[in-house]
Amino acid sequence: MSAKVKPRVAVFKMASCDGCQLQLLDAEEALLELAGAIDIVNFAEASSHIEPGPYDVTLVEGSVSTPETEEQIKEIREQSKVLVTIGACATSGGVQALRNIADTDAFVHTVYPTPEFVKTLEDSHPISDFVKVDLELTGCPVDRGELLGAVTALLNGTMPRVSTSPVCVECKRRGYVCVIVANGEPCLGPVTRTGCGALCPGFGRGCYGCFGPSQPPNTEALGARFLTLGLSKKEAADKFRFITGWAPAFREAADAMENGDRPEKEAAKP
Amino acid sequence: MTHRSVEVPVIARVEGEGALHLSVSDHEIVDLRLEIYEPPRFFEAFLAGRHFSEVPDIVPRICGICPVAYQMSAIHGLELLFGVEVPGGTRELRRLLYCGEWIESHVLHVFLLAAPDFLGFDNAIEMAKVAPDLVKTALEMKRVGNDLMAAIGGREIHPVSPRVGGFSKAPRRRDLEAFLPRLEWALGEMPGIADFVAGLSSPSLPRPTEMVSLVHPDEYPMNEGSLGSTTGRSFDASTFEEVTREVHVEHSNALHSEMIDKGTPYFVGPLARVNLNADRLTPVARDCMDRTGLSLPQADPFFSMAARVVETAVAIEESIRLIRGYEPPEPPMAEVKPRAGRAMWVTEAPRGILYHRYDVDDDGRILEAKIVPPTSQNLRHMEEDLRLFVPDVLDSSDEDLTRMCEMVVRNYDPCISCATHFLRLDIKRT
């Protein structure tokens, strides 16, 4: 990128809570510094000044869950050199993807007072279901440090590296007491990507998977462990089926807990 | 015949996605619609079947700007149903957490979202080039609110420690005391901020209305209290659905609220709270109110920004008081035994009253949930404001008219993300 022409950065939102783009506004002084190095040309939450594409770097939060957003993300992709999806909604469909399971399972019939007013796709999708994504930053919300680090790296022309190791590693590094071992509390830390700084174990509770699956996640062993803690199969499945429950590794783990019998057999071992 | 139309396809500097369509013919409004196209997320549908202990982790995802509000309405309602006695100090710690959210949310709105309108900037980054000290002060104040939330909740967006029964872990006394110098500094900035807001030239929109908020005999309301209105209505969270109802309109993915008896809209938020709780304002807040020129009773929505400044002072003063008296709850969490029934509660989110209702079974699983956020309660009132406001400013240029219409909307600090996630679903189970 030329030194004189500032990179054009855009921020978009689909189905989401605003929390991930709020991480940018919460960056405060760092945002002001960053704003000096880039042109923020489209960021509706922060500015009335809105320019059309093309964009050098585009950040998108939120999942695709309506026909309109499906079209919109394709247009955004065409306008963007580098497309970065941020947060659990954009990378795995978000907590609202819980309805994906409910539609086919527990709910037989869902009706609005006037359903013809509402247009919606059957499922809540991660953005990568529709377009090529150059970088995914998971988290609910995305971690501010990871986000700023990634944007800075991209502006310097390098693709950032994102840790895929589990929360457990971070937990040990910080010397936290293991909530599974000490309290018998179910924790997704062994199979969840770190990025939060092992926040939940540090606050005396189990991880609930905000940052999605680590690589590679041994969900089978953890599911079996949950049963030994006294959880029913449904309760154990619900642990995986949560904030990032539509991520393939967690979706398969939840299905296996409810439908398969293997974890239970393993759980029966001494 | 002169015909004019104004389209604002994306309303900027609000949370979430909305558009405004205005069509005028011979000085008559032919069409005016605040279109909410933010995609619905169906929280009430997928809450059904989940365990009550998961609710404080699900509902904050409705809004990244006011996650604590969602946790507080849910937690208080479920604890009342289950008959939980929380450990001593829990009540104060929850109020302190809420103060952090009020500071963060109000300062974000006043400076980063609203002030650029009055000073003719597109955003706070542009504004910072001309008024760097002002923006730096605002960002530092917002950071105090955010850091307070993170110290108690683990992080400011979607805190992790608030649970049904208390907190998974309570902060140490010295960790909270470390905030005192920063809070004292922020409080010292408040009169200047009030003077700044008083100096902004603002349109006005005097109108008849009914404002609704919590009222509490001893304190400025956040987590507790009964409901009152400026027309003398008095009711309780348990009768909320008998007093108000939500109506589905075609152009909005959010429901509109109205009073059942009169079919009229109502107005919730900081201005409603100040009107109904003026005698519970803290000293610096009272001084700020005088400085902004906010006199009571006051129904002009353009005084909402002043009300946010007043409440920022309340939240800072309350934070100082609560930290000085803080004793960590021990143990941090009470034991919780679920029982079947209906949980209902209202707390004061930064944008106004937030109602939650959960029907729960014997095992503590949610059978049905209903959530009524402040922005959807305000939507019809907002549209009415526009209908009243637009005829007086039709002589303005399209650019000015658009900006003024956006200001009318922004008075409410609307959180469209919140408002759209509650389209009613009738769920039939097999």
Image (cartoon, coloured by chain):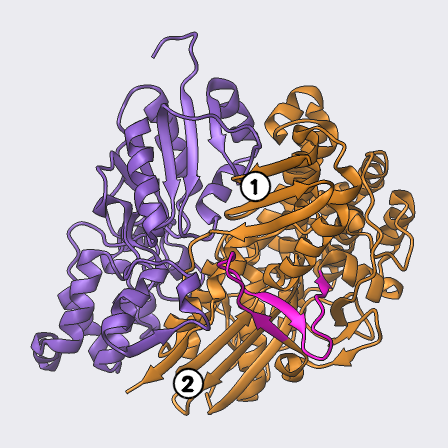
Chain colours: A purple, B orange
Give the magenta part as a residue range.
Answer: B245-268
The answer to whether residue B36 shows anywhere in this view is yes
Comparing B319 with B276, the one in front is B276
Q: Say if the magenta span includes residue B247.
A: yes
Taking the image as shown, residue B298 lies to the left or right of residue A187, namely right
Q: Which residue is mark 2?
A: B364
How would you classify the magenta stretch by its main secondary structure? loop
The quarter of the displayed image where residue B257 is located = bottom right
Q: Residue at x 8, y 79 (%)?
A: A265
Taking the image as shown, residue B92 lies to the left or right of residue A107, namely right
Instruction: Identify which amino acid the numbered label 2 is placed on.
Output: Gly
Element marked by disc 1: loop
Comparing B98 with A227, the one in front is B98
The quarter of the displayed image where residue A179 is located = bottom left
The image shows residue A229, relative to residue A135, as above or below, that is below
Q: Residue at x 47, y 18 (%)?
A: A37
Q: Which residue is mark 1?
A: B11
Chain containing mark 2: B
Q: CA distance from mark 2 to mark 1?
A: 41 Å
Image position, residue A181 (x, y; %): 28, 70
Taking the image as shown, residue B329 lies to the left or right of residue B387, namely left
